Amino acid sequence: MSRGRPTQSIAPVVVVWKASKHGRSKPKMKVFKTKHVDDIIGSKKVHGIPENAIYLDVGVGSSFIERYKKKHKLN
């Protein structure tokens, strides 16, 4: 029998971003499984995303992975 509080699982954070605002820049998707959404939005530098990137969509939960793949036509 375990004691104490049960561990909380962190929902994945899905970020869709572009490198620049030009039309030839393709959107890219990154899924963070160990970071909180406030850490991603509030900081300037996020590992795997450039500083000058434009965030198109940010969602919390695994359901946003398929939703954003369809919306932005990602593989």
Image (cartoon, rainbow, N blue to C red):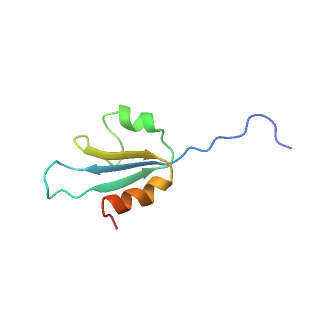
Residue sticking out furthest to the top:
42
Q: Position of residue 38 (x, y in %)?
A: 43, 34
Quadrant the N terminus occupies: top right
Quadrant the C terminus occupies: bottom left
For residue 6, side relative to residue 16 (left or right): right
Of 55 and 35, which appears nearest the observer? Answer: 55
Q: Position of residue 3 (x, y in %)?
A: 81, 37
Of 75 and 33, which appears nearest the observer? Answer: 75
For residue 15, side relative to residue 19 (left or right): right
Residue drawn 82% across and 41% down?
Answer: 2
Of 34 and 20, which appears nearest the observer? Answer: 20
For residue 19, side relative to residue 63 (left or right): left
Residue drawn 44% across and 57% down?
Answer: 65
Number of numbered discs visible in the structure rendering: 0
In the image, is residue 70 above or below residue 35? below
Q: Quadrant of residue 41?
A: top left
Q: Position of residue 51 (x, y in %)?
A: 25, 40
Residue drawn 42% across and 35% down?
Answer: 39
Q: Position of residue 54 (x, y in %)?
A: 24, 44
Residue drawn 16% across and 48% down?
Answer: 21
